Image (tube, helix red, strand yellow):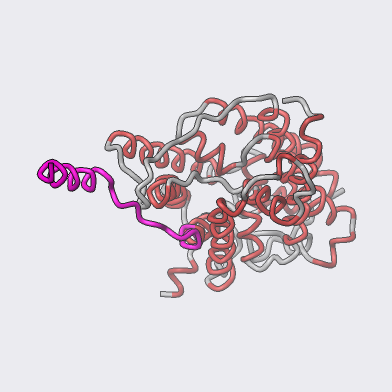
Amino acid sequence: MPETLNTTQPQVQRTQKPSRHIPQWVFVFPGIYFGWVLTKGEAISWYRIEEMFYFQGFHMYGIFMTAIPTGALGIWLIRKWRVKALNGEPIDIPKKQFHKGYILGGFIFGLGWALTGACPGPLYAQIGAGFTIVIITLLSAIFGTWVYSRWKDKLPH
Amino acid sequence: MSHLLQQPLPWYVAGPLIGLTVPLLLLMGNKRLGISSSLRHICAACAPAEIPFLKYDWKKQVWNLYFVLGILIGGFLAGYVFANPHPVAVSSQTSAMLQHWHIQQGVGLLPEQWFNWHQLLSWQGLMFTVVGGFLVGFGTRYAGGCTSGHGIFGLSSLQWPSLVATASFFLGGIVSAHFILPLLFK
C-alpha cells in the first residue's frame, strides 16, 4: 500500500498548479499605464469629445477602431491558447445580460459624456492632469450611481 | 527625453495601446476592464444605506479602486508633469466651432475658462460638472458599464449587448452636443 501512496501523491501535486497570490494593490500599475495612454491619446480631452460628436475629426474614431480589434485579438489568443491568469485562475468572460437599461441608461450617460467631455475613466485622469474642479464632477457621478442603486427597482429593466 | 514624453500620441498608437489593457488585466488576474464599477464600489464602501444593490463585499473588488487610482496618477504624469506644451490639434472645423462658442483654446485638455472653481456656481459650470457628472454616474450604472466596460471590453469580447449600449452612448452624446451644449454658450 505505501507504494500506491507514493505514486499517487506526486501526481496530485503536479496537477494542482500552485496559485500565486497577486495583491490587489498591484493593479495600480496597469492603472497608471491606462491613464497615461488615455491622456497622451487625448481621449480625456473635452475638445476631442466634441470633435467626435460633431463628426469633425477622425481621431477618436481611430482610437476606438484600433483599440477594439487589439483587445479582441488579445482575447482570441487567450482563448486559443487557453492561457491562465498569473494568479493561476482560468480566464473567464461572463456574458453581459441585456436589459432596457443598456439603451436608456446608455443614452443618459451619453448626454453627460458630451457635457463633461469625460466618461468615468477620463474623470480620474482629468483630475490627475490638474483640473481639480473635476473632483466635483466625480463626486456628482458617485452620487448619480448611488441614486440609481437606491431607485433601481422603480426603473424599467 | 522629456520633450519626447510630452508628445501626444496619434490615434493609431494610442488606440492599440488602450486596447492592450484588455488582455493585460485578464492575464494579470482574470480582471475585466471596467471603470464605472469603481463608482459603485465607492458607494458600497461609503454609503451602502441598506440598499441591496450596494450590499456586497466590495473589498474583493478593491483592485478596481487601485486601478482608478493608477489612472489618476497616469493622468498626473501624462497631463501635468509631462503635459503637452501645445494646444490639442483639433480639426479646423472644430477650431472654428470653438471660436463661435467664444472658447479660447489654450494648452491643456479642457477649456480652462469653463472648467475652474470660479465657474462652479455659474449655471454653465453646474451643467459641466454637477449635472454632467450625475448623468455619467447614473447612466453608466443603469447601462451596466461605460465606454471602457462596454465600448472597449464588451466589444472586444464580441458581445452584442455592449454594441447596443455603445450605440446608445453615442446617440446620447450626439443629442447633447448638438442640442444642449450650444445653449450653454449663447
If the image is split into quadrants, where does the C terminus of chain A sit? top right
Residue A5 drawn above or below residue A32: above
Q: Is residue A16 magenta-colored?
A: yes
In this view, the residue in front, B10 or A65, is: A65
In this view, the residue in front, B144 or B97, is: B144
Report which quarter residue B62 is drawn in.
bottom right
Q: Position of residue B99 (x, y in %)?
A: 74, 54
Say whether residue A9 is left or right of residue B6.
left
Residue found 81% across the figure and 53% down from its top: B130
Q: Position of residue B92 (x, y in %)?
A: 62, 49
If the image is split into quadrants, where does the N terminus of chain A sit? top left
In this view, the residue in front, B15 or B85, is: B15
| Residue that protrudes farthest toward the left in the picture | A3
Residue found 34% across the figure and 52% down from its top: A19
**Magenta residue span:** A1-30
- The answer to whether residue B93 is seen in the rendering is no
Q: Position of residue B167 (x, y in %)?
A: 62, 30
- The answer to whether residue A94 is seen in the rendering is yes
SS assignment for the magenta stretch, majority: helix
Residue B165 drawn above or below residue A61: above
Residue found 69% across the figure and 40% down from its top: B141
Say whether residue B78 is left or right of residue A22.
right
Q: Is residue B125 magenta-colored?
A: no
Q: Position of residue A116 (x, y in %)?
A: 72, 50
| Residue that protrudes farthest toward the front in the picture | A1
